[in-house]
Image (tube, helix red, strand yellow):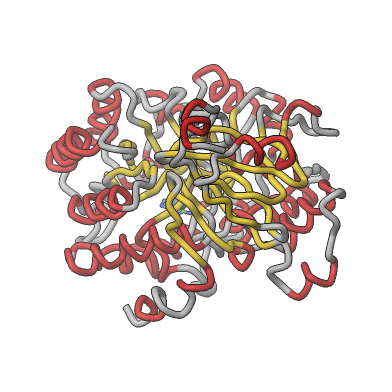
Amino acid sequence: MSSEQALSGRFPLDCNAVRGPLLHFLAEPGVGTPAPDSYEYLPDGVLVWREGRVLATGDAATLLPELPAQCRVEQWPDGLIMPGLIDTHVHMPQLSVMASYGTQLLDWLETYTFPAESRFADPVWAERGAERFVDLLLAHGTTSALVFSTSHRGATEALFRAAHQRDMAIITGKVMMDRHAPEGVRDETRQSYEDSLELIGHWHGRGRQRYAVTPRFAATSSVEQLTLAGRLLGEAPGVLMQTHWAENHAEIAWIRELFPDRKSYLDVYDHFGLLGSTSVLAHGIHIDQEDRRRLAETGSRIAFCPTSNTFLGSGLFDLASAREAGVEVGLATDVGGGTSLSMLATLGEAYKVCQLRGQSLNPFQALYMATLGNAGVLHQADSVGNFAPGKHADFLIIDRFASPMLRMKNTAVSDLRGLLFDLMILGDDRCVRRTYIAGHCRYDRDTAQGVAFDACLSG
Ligand code: GUN
Ligand code: ZN
């Protein structure tokens, strides 16, 4: 093909491509047998992108002849090309808190979490911690996330910087917590509001970064701070709101004592103007139909965090009831209450929580939730979540044979349901062969392992 022909063809000369089995979702697949038009699965597919944006997907047999000779096509016959995973609730400063023994929520916060977060007052610690965190997200195949920072403005800036440098879409915010927490993590009511406002001004909409107003939970914010959090939402349209809600019985009893005039825990957030379609409430385990009705009515979302909910002994989230009530639910790791940054491992635990409730989570639904579904929960579905042309080329090369068990099962690509269920139950970060952000490889298992992360461990 001459260069004139290539130039006049469908694809520009400087496009890039990967070839292999390819899966992405186009719509919600439903809870039973997935609707055939809800996903595209190509046993021998191609993803083409240029300047960070998806140009096309298609069958190799059709698409390859259309690509210009200059287009580099990487071959991944043993892989699975899929969109990057999205985490709707995770804590940047809690990596070291993971796997802390023996406590439930309120003791866990006092004993392990607040001390770990207080270290992020130190700018050097915060910088290293933020960089380590985003690199570990990438190593786990997570390309976008809604993240709790700490109450420190500097740590929040460090997280935005680290994500921005990697062109990674992160939504985060300075944690607001002006009471019932030790010095070192407790902030000051007015300063917290002003810091949040300045961070919004500087970071919200800068590159791929967005801001989330972040009152930790109703117990650690005064009435004045919750009022100011509500005001921030009104003052900065388009910012998200994230908090914790109805996770643990002792927590719920405490909220009842602190807010005797409010008819429920959810009503506390409602009263301060903190519900709405840009609000993501982590957990929502111990709730009733009235709560679900109000969530659906306001468009507020729940982040379901299965590994955290079992590890902290919090309870079993009722996914089917939330769905039936029309509540949008995202999946999340909630590290460090959660026990893995891997969204694949999280899908497996979500399946088990559903089983314990007599419900089922099929692999199509689960992988939809971890990609396009979570993108929708975070209002990002116009830019990530699948391979629709024009979206950011955030994608993974999954190694289908990453562990001895997966190799032993050796599920054929023609058995898509089996393949996805294997990944969901047996898969984890070992399956992440490569992670691409806007078309750039930001994690390669072969070159990164043992180099980038060893130094972190001593930190
Ligand atoms: N509730 C308030 N803070 C936290 C936190 O850091 N993790 C979890 N799981 N729940 C919380
Ligand atoms: Zn959390």
Q: Nearer the viewer, residue 201 or 407?
A: 407
Q: Is residue 229 above or below residue 128?
A: above
Give above or below for 233 relative to 79. above
Q: In which quadrant will I find the N terminus?
A: top right
* Quadrant (top left/top right/bottom left/bottom right) for the C terminus: bottom left
Q: Quadrant of residue 193?
A: top left
Residue 47 position, x and y percent, is: 60, 42
Q: Residue furthest front?
A: 2
Q: Residue at x 32, y 47 (%)?
A: 220
> Looking at the image, can residue 15 be seen?
yes
Q: Position of residue 322 (x, y in %)?
A: 66, 31
Rendered position, 212 above or below 93 = above
Residue 234, quarter of the rendered image = top left
How many numbered marks appear? 0
> Residue 127: where, in percent of width, then height?
23, 63
Which residue sits at x=54%, y=47%? 395
Give how far across and how far down residue 89 sits, in percent: 47, 47
Q: Is residue 377 visible?
A: no
Nearer-the-camera pick, 272 or 22: 22
Does residue 13 appear left or right of residue 45 in this picture? left
Question: Relative to 61, is 214 on the left or the right?
Answer: left
Q: Residue at x 56, y 57 (%)?
A: 308
Q: Determine the residue located farthest toward the top in the rendered image.
A: 297
